[in-house]
Amino acid sequence: MAGRQGWTRDQLLVAFNLYCRIPFGMFHSKNPELIQYAERIGRSPSALAMKLSNIASIDPSFTKSGRKGLDGASAADKAMWVEMSADWEGFAEKSNYAISDLGITAAEEEAQHKRVSDYLIDDIQKVDHTGKTKETIVKVRVGQNFFRKSVLSAYNNKCCITGLAIPSLLVASHIVPWSVDPKNRLNPQNGLCLSMLHDKAFDMGMMTINEDMTVRVSEKVGDPEDEYFNSALMSFNGKAIDLPEKFQPNEAFLDWHRGVFFEKWA
């Protein structure tokens, strides 16, 4: 299975899933998680690491920054990118099944996370399970976990506004809410890595992101004499956010946020 044989569909699903949820700095053959997955899919760690770099070469967010991955992306890689981008929810489900088939238990995966300092501790966001079937609940959890890992890894597990790097205090914040755009619920380009406070302010439209990727805080929010408000929110007004290494926020989504949410406070 290893060697020069072409990559199977399941192998590609696993590789693309890893591409989404592992920071660029961990795309190397000594990463314990890559070693584990490479063994399970019948590839060498270096081959899997190379595949992730090949995928980077077809990631528009990555190439737009002037960087380039390896030049070995195959037609199958490009087709998988198109498939993933067209249906994030379907990709999250299918790639999770491919990983499940490898026999890696949740305990094993968690153990790997603990051995890699760059990884965050899984923290599935809360959802309203009222009236949902067990199967639907599982799909929602899988999807939200995938979205969270993809967004946080893109921003190297740091709030893009403050630089806060405590995973348990970070949120994969939707730009266009989950309920508004089902097609892009799991699209990492519809996410920002924010601290809990700034996620709440962004979600309420008290702050937004300008076209030049700077923070914009409404002057109608808070009391100018409130020292905490000034230091925690207003002090970031006009500051450029730290852009992700992959899955840069989609301008159309940010434009929607400015026009619908922030407009209420403008």
Image (cartoon, helix red, strand yellow):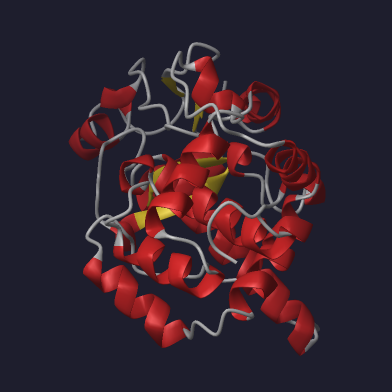
> Residue extending furthest front?
4
Position above or below: 210 against 93: above
**Which quarter of the figure is the N terminus placed in?**
bottom right
Residue 79, given in percent of the width and then of the height, sits at 77, 40
Can I make out residue 209 in this image? no
Number of numbered discs overlaid on the protein picture = 0
Residue at image point 45% right, 71% down: 39
**Can residue 190 be seen in this snapshot?**
yes
Q: Nearer the viewer, residue 241 or 216?
A: 241
Q: In this orientation, which residue lies closer to the viewer: 224 or 22?
A: 22
The residue under the point 32% across, 63% down is 168
Please state if 60 lies on the left or on the right of 106 as rendered: right
Q: Position of residue 101 (x, y in %)?
A: 64, 80
**Residue at position x 49%, y 34% in the image:** 246
Q: Residue 120 appears in which quarter of the rendering?
A: bottom left
Relative horizontal placement of residue 132, taking residue 198 as reference (left or right): right
Left or right of 139? Residue 209 is left
In the rendered view, tell whether residue 209 sits above or below residue 158.
above
* Residue 8 left/right relative to 217: right
**Picture coordinates of residue 249 (x, y %)?**
56, 30
Where residue 100 sits: x, y (%)?
61, 79
Residue 193, above or below 8? above
Residue nearest the viewer, comparing 3 with 171: 3
Picture residue at 55% right of the left edge, 26% below the top: 61
Q: Quadrant of the C terminus?
A: top right
Using the image as rendered, state which of residue 1 and residue 148 is in the foreground.
1
